[in-house]
Image: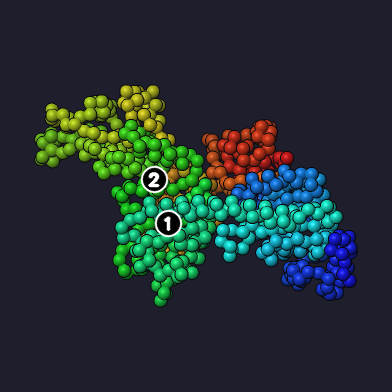
Amino acid sequence: MRVDPADRSAIRRQLDRAWARFVSDGELSDVRPDIARSWTRARDVYRVDPALRRAPGVPMDDLWERRCAQDEVFEVARPVLASFSARLRDDGHVLAYLDAAGWMLWLGGDPRVGEALAASNFCPGASWREEATGTSGPGTTLAERRPMEVFASEHFVEAWHGWTSAAAPILAPDAEAPPVGIVDLTASWDAPAPPAIVTAVAIAAAIGERLRARQGIRDALVRYAMRGARDAGDALVAVDGRGRVLEANDAALRRLALEGGELPAAARERVLAALRGPAAAADDALAIEWTGPGEERRRAVGAAVRHERAVVGAILRVLPPAGRGRAAPSVPAPGVVRDAFQRILGRSDRLRAAIDLAQVAARNDLPVVLHGESGTGKELFAQGIHAASARAEKRLVALNCGAIPTTLIEAELFGYEPGTFTGGQREGKAGKLEEASGGTLFLDEVSELPPQAQTALLRVLQEGEVVRLGGSKARPVDVRIVAATNRRLDDEVAAGRFRHDLFFRLNVLAIPIPPLRERSEDVPLLARALLADAEERMGRSGLDLSAAALDVLSRHRWPGNVRELKNVVLRAAAVVATPVIEPRDLLLADIPEPPSRGRAVALDRPGPLAPERRVDGPEGETDEPGRDELVAALDASGWNIARTATSLGVSRMTLYRRLRRFGITR
């Protein structure tokens, strides 16, 4: 029986009958082909219960929080969604955003409709894929990969028959890729019907345009990084975040057979895995292997390119096949310091702040004091400052003031004339200050300088000339001092062990380097990079750290900092019997218990992950706000999770955990 297309009630009655026939005896009639396909999938493939009352929700754990926080499309879509949502507040429609897996992350629009839909769990945290909820606007749009409007009884589940939903896919710049998100407009089936499907398509298109604009910027950034990375003889390839070749130099074209201008399928698969894997989430260093023609093993190393903290591509150096020349190392050889800042691995706020200060120091000649515990990488910072400075063409000379006997420290610093020492060089010897003239002198553990050497060093810095021991001739020196210490120099001054005038002369630019325990979010990327080095030393390959092992490493206190982590990873690589390193293989004596997980809180609007700042106190205590302080901070920021986390100096993930601990919900 044909019905008037304008008579919504008649259409509803016809669909009711068609749905009942299908559910009872499997008869398919009086429904559109796409709805018929969806009903069949829901019943025969996914076995969805048509009597379902609520859409399934995701467990509110850290995995779900990360899904929300790391959805880059949502970050781009948020301004567009907010703008349209404001127009729909009294329109009888709700506007929803769902990610590429069908999980709802955001709901706006008319709050009265949102409250009514909550009974069906049409809210953030619920899955609306066809596999979970049968035929629906969002789920069937994902399945069909095109805009869909599902009216009343066209929904497979009877509980959704009172609603009409119109959804449109958000497409990535790569049109061949599946949808990266879904925009959905839902209202009561008998509500006044504006062109909802047209509106949904328009919103999805606006978000897609923002994605394409961002991708254009990122591709340009990768190409710019490619131009900056060119080295004679290196086979360099620039790829975007989808593993597609943006640019390749002649050496790469000769060394790597590109298929239609793209990487070989096996290589692209490995690149994508590296760019999207857990290591790339925090680490810029990449290393991939694949099988080339004739079962030939091929390798490439390189660095990820980031934009607004997201990995947007990579610059790869394709290494020669084994046996055809020496492969370029992925880590610079000792003494090569040109790229020292790039070798400082980590994305934590405190480390990035230290690197920013070091880059400022590299642009001038002022003295620098690097303060940090043993093993935090102070020498690497010194190398970076020198390599990026105008003195880079001259020498960087290092002297560990704590490793040389007091009686010899002045001879090492200032040199000596012939005959000054029994057993000394017959022709005398220039000191470190003369050797570093025109360049940089790195004084490690400067607090260990004896008083007499402090006095002589102060005179050199004031007058710009040095007199060798046993001599009288003043020799001009032009040297930049970068000092390092694991003690606070102001405390040493107060204790009378360090000259206050030398302190003021050296401590012009002070750069604190955080210990590893205060940047635990950097541990996974450091561990993976150190594991790659350990494999080379041990002559092994294919080793990996399990998620549990990385968790244990992240929670360890690391009194020896990066140096200790390096030794632990090297030891594990040497003794592990399987390809995957588990916690037991780390041989850590003080593995802490995993933190307990409390009840989850309601979702707020998530945003990009921010590095966590840990504030560990003595004996494992933490300086954390209590329940009242958390509520006050939330009230002060209007319950905006991102602003609250920033005001407390923690990441969103840490704030979510504390809210769960105290049972705080909005």
- Residue 462 visible to an observer of this rendering: yes
- Residue 457's disc is none
Judging depth in this view, the residue of 577 and 532 nearest the camera is: 532
Q: Quadrant of residue 205?
A: bottom right
Measured from the top left, where is residue 40 in percent x and y? 76, 71
Measured from the top left, where is residue 256 in percent x and y? 39, 68
Judging depth in this view, the residue of 575 and 200 nearest the camera is: 200
Closer to the chain start, of discs 2 and 1, is 1
Within 10 angstroms of label 2, few (less than 14), some, or many (20 or more) residues?
A: many
- Residue annotated with mark 1: 315
- Residue annotated with mark 2: 341
How many numbered marks appear? 2
Within 10 angstroms of label 1, few (less than 14), some, or many (20 or more) residues?
A: many
Q: Quadrant of residue 323?
A: bottom left
User: What element does badge 2 sit on?
Assistant: helix
User: What element does badge 1 sit on?
Assistant: strand
Measured from the top left, where is residue 494 in percent x and y? 39, 23
Q: Residue furthest bottom?
A: 294
- For the point 28% across and 37% down, the residue is 441
Q: What quarter of the picture does the N terminus occupy?
A: bottom right
The kind of residue tagged 1 is Ile
- For the point 76% across and 64% down, the residue is 134
Above or below 473: residue 538 = below
- Image check: 424 left or right of 347? left
Above or below 519: residue 210 = below
Chosen colour scheme: rainbow
- Image check: 216 left or right of 73? left
Measured from the top left, where is residue 387 in percent x and y? 32, 44
- Residue 573 visible to an observer of this rendering: no
Q: Quadrant of residue 127?
A: bottom right
The kind of residue tagged 2 is Phe
